[in-house]
Image (spheres, helix red, strand yellow):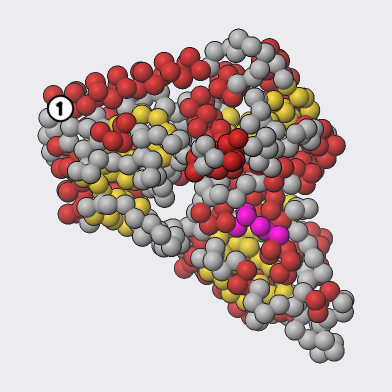
Amino acid sequence: MYTASNAFLDALVEAGVSCIFANWGSDHPSLIEAIAKARACGRKIPAIVTCPSEMAGLSAAHGYYLLSGKPQAVVVHVECGTQSLAGAVHNAAKGRIPVLIFAGASPFTQHSEMKGSRNEFIQWIQDVHDQRGLVRGYTKYDNEVRTGKNIKQLVHRALQFAESDPCGPVYLMAAREVMEEEVTPSITHVNQWRPLPSLPMPEHGVAAIAKALEAASKPLIVTSYVGRNPGAVEQLVRLCRKLGIGVLESVPNRMNFPHQDVLYQGNQWNQPVQNPVLAEADVILVLDSDVPWIPTVSRPAENALIFHIDVDPLKEQMQLWHIPSECAFRADAQTAISQINTYFENYSVDATRVDQRRAHYSAQHEARRRRLQELEQLPQNDGITSEYLVACVRRHIDENAIVINESVSEFHTVFNHLALSRPGSIFTSGGGSLGWNGGAAVGAKLASPDKTVIVFAGDGSFMFSEPHAVHWMASRYKAPFLQIVFNNRGWKSPKLSALSLHPSEYASKAESIDVDFDPPPNYASIAAAAGGAYARQLRSPHEVEPALVEALRAVREEGRCAVLDVWLPHL
């Protein structure tokens, strides 16, 4: 008997899905049976990764995509499991991660009219008006499978949406009766469901941007995630070196430009100061960025000429968004920058002007490098600074390392002091829902078992990440990683937000504003209990180097996670 569930699994295999990150419920008997049958009969199906937390499961699928470039599947149960995806679906949407979420639904018969009819009390309680509506604000496509006869079509259609720019999550749901339906096996022509090709720039736009950049005295490119495509980074480096263009990262979630390059001008997050590089630029190209600057604190000069390129320049999911650009273009970054580079193959540039720009940006780059180097020195008191900690990590990793960064108030510290230059070497969620780091690390390691995965997490984001589930998954599926917890005993970011608006009022003088976890949990011991991780708490800078050596040995040689709970100054 070949059922809709068998067809669903076959569709995932056809689409190149490697893993199903699953949190099973009473709505999945047919899928569970189909998986057992496939294993017994030697039929190919995706690997099943059992996820005790839906948040961790979707985060793992997210992390897997970052390293593999292929969307994965997440299976959850009815509306309860859908709700338990929590902020992970927000992160997938904002990070533009293609992933197929498949949920069960309460059976729609109750007197044994069909196989799969209701036989447990929970199936009445979990029957809600609009299950798909729970995630509709975050998904590119949602649908209910009403018959097994076209389930393969719907899977491939959903994934076509997911992988077409701008990428994002998609959602399907089906009741037990549908998944039990007997269907006729069919062959799918997968090439008919390919994602839409990337968009180029119009020629007039290429010429306008190229001429403006070449004529500028201080041209600047602002980007956040051009590094999602390593090929785009290569084209960007080529353009900037040819013309002497500076690069500023705003809220980066990738390695977008080599940090060692003299044209690199740093990265800005929520720092409440005007960025001087942004302020002095006369021509700015905003390339792949959701938040190129925060205008209440840092903005370009009023007379700056601004251009904008993005696969989603309208920011269609954002209710309020605007930058004062002369013109904006919906285009793929690699394609667009390649077009501009091709333009300059037949256009001679002013070498003297290029040298002047390069000299200007080189001087600023060197001054920044010296400032960062001063911050990295061994602390003279007995406390650990985040800058010293990250610099120590930098000395112990190599080109084989993958960094997952969810350090929140230390985001900029990690990017600054790792100073990476390889595309695909560092990732953030791309969204704003904390708790992504642990699941993402498991998924990244499963996708690239030969890589050393390093996680930087704030103590708040560590607790949000469902560490008991994450470290069980890492142990069960042999996906070890090093997790470094910035432990400042509380939520520093809400404190900074409150004081930015009320710098001298009651909150600034209060003994507590209810954002601290002091005394804190023993984070490393949580991981040790859940998954046998190497666990160590650090309070002195002299402990950092030897602890890193032991932690990395545990990950690389013993094949188990390591968690370093590093005490920083209190928030």
Residue extent of the magenta highlight: 84-89
Magenta span contains residue 87: yes
Residue located at (25% from left, 23% from top): 360
Residue 85, position as x, y percentages in the image: 67, 58
Residue located at (66% from left, 17% from top): 383
**For residue 213, what is the image quadrant?**
top left
Residue located at (32% from left, 42% from top): 299
Q: Is mark 1 on a helix, strand or loop?
A: helix
Q: In screen coordinates, is 221 left or right of 130?
A: left
Question: In this rendering, is residue 437 above or below 566?
Answer: below
Residue 21, position as x, y percentages in the image: 70, 55
Question: In this rendering, is residue 145 above or below 478?
Answer: below
**For residue 127, what is the image quadrant?**
bottom right
Residue beneath disc 1: 353
Question: In this rendering, is residue 470 above or below 90?
Answer: above
Question: Is residue 334 visible to us here?
Answer: no
Q: In screen coordinates, is 557 left or right of 444?
A: right
Which image quadrant: the C terminus?
Answer: top right
Which residue is nearer to you in this view: 319 or 101?
319
Residue located at (58% from left, 29% from top): 401
Question: In this rendering, is residue 340 above or below 265?
Answer: below
Residue 552, position as x, y percentages in the image: 69, 24
Magenta span contains residue 302: no
Which residue is nearer to you in this view: 512 or 102?
512
Residue 428, position as x, y percentages in the image: 54, 42
Which residue is nearer to you in this view: 214 or 200?
214
Q: In screen coordinates, is 227 left or right of 262?
A: right
Question: Is residue 120 visible to us here?
Answer: yes
Which image quadrant: the N terminus?
Answer: bottom right
Dot 1 surroundings within 10 Å: few (below 14), some, or many (20 or more)? some
Check disc 1 and give the amino acid type.
Arg
Which residue is nearer to you in this view: 160 or 23?
23
